[in-house]
Image (cartoon, rainbow, N blue to C red):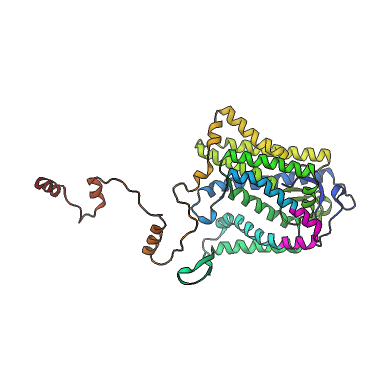
Amino acid sequence: MADVEQNVAVPDAAGNGSDAVNGTAGRFVSSPEGTALAYGSLLFMALLPIFFGALRSVGCSKSKNASDMPETITSRDAARFPIIASCTLFGLYLFFKIFSQEYINLLLSMYFFVLGILALSHTMSPFMCRVFPANLPNKQYQLLFTQGSGESKEEIVNYEFDTKDLICLGISSVVGVWYVLKKHWIANNLFGLAFALNGVELLHLNNVSTGCILLGGLFVYDVFWVFGTNVMVTVAKSFEAPIKLVFPQDLLEKGLDASNFAMLGLGDIVIPGIFIALLLRFDVSLKKNTRTYFYTSFLAYIFGLGLTIFVMHTFKHAQPALLYLVPACVGFPVLLALFKGELTEMFSYDSSDEVLPHTPRLTHFPTVSGSPSSLANSMQSFGLSTPRRRRHTPSDIYEESSPEEAPSKEEVTESDKDK
């Protein structure tokens, strides 16, 4: 994952970067106040998607809307992730060495323009639901794209949205155009925060063991690519996309036109964040009305990121944030569980069991239209409304029958006598 680095100059819209030595053209030396403001702002911005994304992950795991279903990371996925991330990082490094940086960033800008609009719109959706005036009509829309005809017709895109979603998309599009045209650091941070929050909300670790495998593998990955090579720092400086949070250290001197940035990669937010969100769901599963493990890991993240910034500022060298975040975010909750005698419960907890535990997992969802009877038939065809068989007693039969059809007790008695 990307690192926290002091005095990193972000290339401008034309792709012209500043000097790599201490990061800025003219070797601008930021004031202590500006540096403290930049570091404090990065820390605050990192905490926002973790806190709110973890809270939204609890509701996401209980949601019955198929579009809000989380993506579960298994132990196999966690073991392969550092290898895939290393290949991707080195591939980007080669691309920037071989091809023109300007054209690569132009292509990436278009790609992240679309993703950023969708991510920011999804982030704004709960807030829009609260502020949307009740007297305004909220119309429903559907974007349907199919392939074939008749019985062989297959849905390619089936996107349902309403007026509130359109407003969110409109606001997000304005931010997207601002980012593409100006590459302003505020637009970059809006998209970056949206990506991070959606990642924490929708990426779920299935258990604590998987989280330890993932964080342990990325711990080695981050240390190797930052300390062992210059690949991570080179890609972070060259990659002109909202995959990092930045904040200017010369904001007090130059205002919004500042260009001397400190940065924090989104991976250093999302990876510990999904582990912290898992611990929050574990707290909820204990049903003790406490959030002990969540707050412990959250404070551990603050401690780890603060230590990262301190070491980076002291030695004036980019630091792999996961080097400090992983031991803190894993070690503190595990020690707490060991102290409370809940270590077995923590490692036996399975988050995937809480995602609609009584609903069958479907590879696709039926398209339902028409009358209520057709809806019922469609649900039965997918096994969604099949009643559970149970042994009926005579009293159950009386209760389930209509008053006209249910025989009286006297009739049953006479019938038994005849037999």
Residue at 46% of width from left, 71% of height from top?
A: 150
Tell me if residue 227 comes above or below residue 387 in the rendering.
Answer: above
Report the residue at 70% width, 45% height from top.
268
Tell me: residue 419, above or below residue 150. Answer: above
Q: Residue furthest right?
A: 26
Q: Is residue 266 visible?
A: no
Q: Is residue 256 left or right of residue 62?
A: right
SS majority, magenta: helix
Query: Would residue 155 be found to the left or right of residue 398 on screen?
Result: right
Q: Is residue 238 magenta?
A: no
Residue 149 visible in this rendered orientation of the protein: yes
Residue 200 position, x and y percent, is: 62, 48
Q: Quadrant of residue 37?
A: top right
Was residue 98 drawn as part of the magenta stretch in this picture? yes
Identify which residue is drawn at 23% across, 55% down. Answer: 402
Q: In this figure, what is the number of numbered marks?
A: 0
Residues in magenta, as a range: 91-109
> Residue 351: where, in percent of width, then height?
53, 43
> Residue 216 at x, y = what percent?
67, 39
Foreground of the two, 309 or 342: 342
Q: How far across and how far down the image is residue 392, in percent?
A: 26, 46
User: Which of the 4 image quarters holds residue 272?
Assistant: top right
